Image (spheres, rainbow, N blue to C red):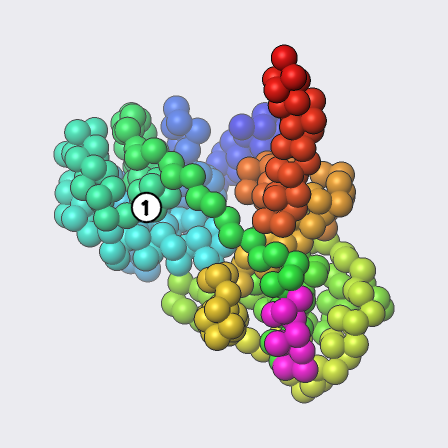
């Protein structure tokens, strides 16, 4: 922890009236109060928060926290999720709660103190039969995160299923042109082009409001996502780098200008509706199945084909590093891939194969 921050926390703790927070070896703060002759510990990252909660417990305004030793795995994970509610994105919280209510149910009633590495490994082995390696990794990560807070002495060394290599399907430019023609003049045209032509994420497209249009520039500064309870939440972009400005092509600017001003958002589709619309088009015209997010891959692939430097590609796509660009978007369109194969084969045919036949 930063020395200055630590010093401020200690000074804050010293100023608080009794019960006074005490710093633990872990760096967290414990505040003890007596309730009905029973000593209650309140442990938090910030001494002021620990103090306030302890006073609330003493006054009967807040339920006392169950001692960590008595927590079940389900209760520990619930408490962990609640503690991160203000710092994690609504979609991440929603994903955690979905795992908690589904896959993690068999561990809910296991006492945290009784959980063993073997039990976690057997649980992982069992769920790996019916779920993808990515899902298993997310479940294990949530268990591990809760343990790091409520049982820090237990460090998991679980063997997880090997990550599957997934081939990202990217529409060819011919398919994009064909789909764009089918979308022309419909309300689907604008979100379609914002994804394929400008590389916006689905949540960024849905979060565009009129004040995001600054002259001929589109300011991507927010995203519309689903919260844990299914409600729509307007939040900041996925990352700091996601907050970016992109010049609007004249054709897309005209589409934006044609949108009804009475609506708060430029695009009024629900997330699932965008996915379903593209799925129907692909099925109707016998095209491969593409997800709406796959349209964003087109933007990245085109920039790679045009040899756009990573710095500018990252800026346009809203990535903080080139890891995503290299690991996820380093795909070439099928036609270009065939052209590369033809060039390589031709080179070897003329320089190697001929020599072998003449020798």
State the image coordinates of residue 109 (x, y, percent, origin top left).
15, 48
Measured along the vertical axis of the image, is residue 180 above or below residue 239? below
The residue at the point 62 percent across, 80 percent down is 187
By secondary structure, the bulk of the magenta-drawn segment is best described as: helix
Whether residue 10 is visible, yes or no, is yes
Magenta residues (range): 177-186
The residue at the point 44 percent across, 53 percent down is 92
Screen quadrant of the C terminus: top right
Q: Please state which of residues 165 and 207 is positioned toward the viewer in this rendering.
A: 165
Residue density around tag 1, few if under 14, some if 14–19, many if 20 or more, within 10 Å:
some
Q: Please state which of residues 351 and 234 is positioned toward the viewer in this rendering.
A: 351
Q: Secondary structure at mark 1?
A: loop
State the image coordinates of residue 131 (x, y, percent, origin top left).
28, 48
As drawn, the residue found furthest toward the front would be 358
Screen quadrant of the N terminus: top right
* Residue tagged 1: 132
Q: Please state which of residues 331 and 318 is positioned toward the viewer in this rendering.
A: 331
Q: Position of 248 compared to 197: left or right?
A: right
Q: Please state which of residues 61 and 209 is positioned toward the viewer in this rendering.
A: 209
Quadrant hosting residue 340: top right
């Amino acid at each position: 922890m930063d020395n200055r921050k630590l010093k401020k926390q200690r000074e804050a703790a010293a100023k608080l009236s009794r019960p006074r927070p005490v710093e633990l070896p872990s760096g967290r703060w414990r505040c003890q109060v007596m309730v009905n002759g029973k000593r209650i510990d309140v442990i938090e990252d910030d001494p002021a928060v620990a103090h306030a909660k302890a006073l609330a417990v003493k006054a009967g305004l807040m339920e006392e926290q169950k001692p960590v030793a008595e927590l079940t795995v389900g209760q520990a994970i619930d408490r962990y999720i609640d503690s991160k509610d203000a710092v994690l994105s609504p979609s991440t919280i929603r994903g955690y709660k979905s795992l908690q209510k589904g896959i993690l149910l068999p561990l809910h009633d296991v006492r945290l103190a009784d959980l063993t590495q073997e039990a976690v490994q057997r649980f992982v082995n069992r769920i790996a039969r019916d779920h993808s390696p990515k899902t298993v990794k997310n479940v294990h990560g949530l268990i591990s995160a809760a343990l790091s807070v409520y049982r820090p002495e237990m460090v998991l060394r679980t063997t997880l299923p090997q990550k599957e290599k997934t081939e990202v399907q990217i529409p060819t430019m011919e398919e994009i042109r064909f789909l764009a023609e089918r979308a022309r003049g419909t309300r689907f045209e604008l979100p379609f082009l914002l994804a394929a032509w400008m590389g916006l994420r689905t949540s960024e497209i849905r979060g565009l409001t009129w004040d995001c249009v600054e002259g001929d520039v589109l300011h991507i500064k927010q995203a519309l996502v689903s919260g844990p309870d299914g409600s729509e939440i307007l939040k900041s972009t996925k990352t700091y780098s996601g907050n970016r400005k992109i010049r609007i092509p004249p054709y897309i600017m005209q589409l934006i200008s044609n949108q009804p001003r009475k609506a708060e958002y430029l695009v009024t589709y629900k997330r699932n509706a965008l996915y379903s619309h593209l799925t129907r088009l692909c099925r109707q015209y016998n095209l491969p199945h593409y997800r709406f997010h796959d349209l964003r891959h087109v933007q990245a692939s085109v920039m790679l084909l045009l040899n756009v430097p990573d710095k500018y590609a990252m800026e346009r796509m809203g990535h903080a590093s080139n890891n995503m660009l290299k690991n996820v978007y380093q795909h070439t369109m099928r036609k270009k891939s065939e052209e590369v194969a033809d060039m390589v084969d031709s080179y070897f045919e003329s320089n190697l194969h001929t020599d072998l036949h003449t020798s």
